[in-house]
Image (cartoon, grey):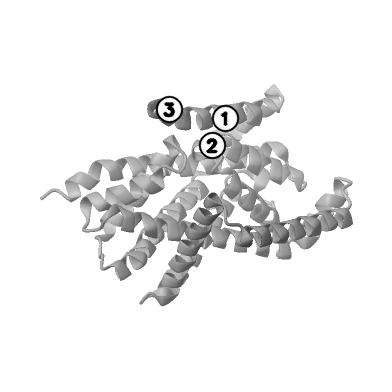
């Protein structure tokens, strides 16, 4: 496959999938319900939407500040404004081509600061691994905290919880067996994966050894607390979700976080996932879908506006 065609497909395919999910998200409802979704979005309380946007900006500021801790052991002390602009520019790029932002973020900082691209990109990979572990931690806490809610969900759907636990146990055993075979394999591809994982472990050790490791960890928890907060406060923007319990919103947040990476910026699939989760746990389907679209629209516009200004201002701020 030609490189140009491959690059275009990386942009077009997720976008087409996204529009497909937009269609599914809206046209699984009747015309009157679609009108109600649109009405909810237009009449959403802008105060709570604005609070969500401010919390989102704070999370991005914290991410930019945390990134500097990873760069310091390399002898690099970038200007905070450059770190922030690079982060926002990367988010903007991800709206066009999923997962392209990490590369662009490293390249942007390397262009304006005394740091090699490989070094900057390495810290971004380390950061992503830590964020993924944080997401898994949130998943674990959500499962433990919401055990009754999840079991009730299975019972309401006529799914035997015991069967689910047995299936989960078998899955865990298969994973352990796979890890055992993986550790003994000498296949070239497997060896490369092992080498990558060793690099990840080394990166995590670097976090523990860094001068400001406590601040790094605190900012990591702050980022994810802000993510959850900017998601939850939107429930007060429309009447239909104001009484949705935090437990349901935590489950929706987790599912939405995984869905976000499937299409460009989570278009289509993110609101669909949020709405389906809220409805699945007894909430109003129309209100849940409206909630998902409000969250997605607010945060996407934030990225477009701030990311766009970051791309424009970065050359000006760094002009000699």
Mark 2 secondary-structure assignment: loop
Q: Position of residue 105 (x, y in %)?
A: 34, 49
- The crowd level at tag 1 (other Cα within 10 Å; few <14, some 14-19, many 20+) is some
Closer to viewer: mark 1 or mark 3: 3
Q: Residue at x 59, y 48 (%)?
A: 258
The answer to whether the residues at label 1 and label 3 have Cβ atoms under 8 Å apart is no
Q: Is residue 273 left or right of residue 128?
A: right
**98 or 145, nearer to the observer:** 98
Mark 3 secondary-structure assignment: helix
Residue located farthest toward the front when viewing the structure as drawn: 186
Q: Residue at x 29, y 45 (%)?
A: 310
The answer to whether the residues at label 2 and label 3 have Cβ atoms under 8 Å apart is no
Q: Quadrant of residue 82?
A: bottom left
Q: How far separated are the C-alphas under marks 1 and 3? A: 14 Å
The answer to whether the residues at label 1 and label 2 have Cβ atoms under 8 Å apart is yes
Whether residue 172 is situated above or below residue 291 in the rendered picture? below
Look at the image and tell me whether residue 44 can be seen.
no
Q: Position of residue 233 (x, y in %)?
A: 56, 53
Residue denoted by label 3? 8
Whether residue 209 is situated above or below residue 126 in the rendered picture? below
Nearer-N-terminus badge (1/2): 1
Residue denoted by label 1? 17
In the rendered structure, find residue 263 and report the number of the disc placed on it.
Answer: 2
**179 or 290, nearer to the observer:** 179
């Amino acid at each position: 496959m030609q490189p140009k065609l491959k690059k275009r497909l990386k942009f077009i395919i997720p976008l087409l999938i996204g529009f497909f999910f937009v269609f599914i998200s809206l046209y699984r409802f009747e015309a009157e319900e679609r009108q109600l979704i649109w009405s909810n979005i237009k009449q959403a309380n802008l105060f709570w939407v604005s609070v969500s946007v401010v919390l989102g900006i704070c999370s991005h500021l914290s991410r930019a500040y945390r990134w500097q801790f990873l760069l310091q052991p390399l002898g690099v002390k970038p200007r905070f404004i450059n770190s922030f602009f690079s982060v926002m520019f990367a988010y903007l790029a991800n709206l066009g081509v999923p997962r392209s932002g990490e590369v662009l973020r490293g390249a942007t900082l390397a262009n304006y600061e005394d740091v090699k691209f490989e070094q900057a990109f390495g810290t971004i990979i380390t950061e992503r691994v830590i964020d993924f572990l944080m997401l898994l931690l949130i998943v674990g806490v959500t499962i433990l905290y919401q055990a009754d809610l999840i079991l009730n969900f299975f019972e309401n759907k006529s799914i035997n919880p015991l069967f689910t636990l047995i299936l989960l146990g078998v899955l865990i055993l298969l994973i352990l067996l796979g890890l055992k075979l993986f550790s003994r394999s000498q296949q070239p591809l497997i060896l490369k994966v092992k080498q990558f994982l060793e690099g990840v472990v080394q990166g995590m050790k670097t976090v523990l050894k860094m001068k400001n490791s406590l601040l790094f960890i605190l900012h990591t928890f702050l980022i994810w607390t802000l993510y959850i907060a900017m998601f939850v406060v939107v429930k007060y923007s429309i009447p239909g979700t104001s009484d949705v319990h935090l437990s349901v919103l935590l489950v929706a947040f987790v599912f939405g976080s995984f869905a976000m990476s499937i299409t460009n910026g989570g278009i289509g699939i993110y609101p669909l996932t949020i709405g389906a989760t809220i409805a699945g746990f007894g909430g109003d389907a129309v209100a849940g879908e409206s909630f998902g679209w409000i969250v997605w629209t607010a945060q996407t516009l934030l990225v477009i506006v701030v990311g766009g200004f970051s791309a424009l201002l970065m050359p000006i701020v760094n002009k000699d």
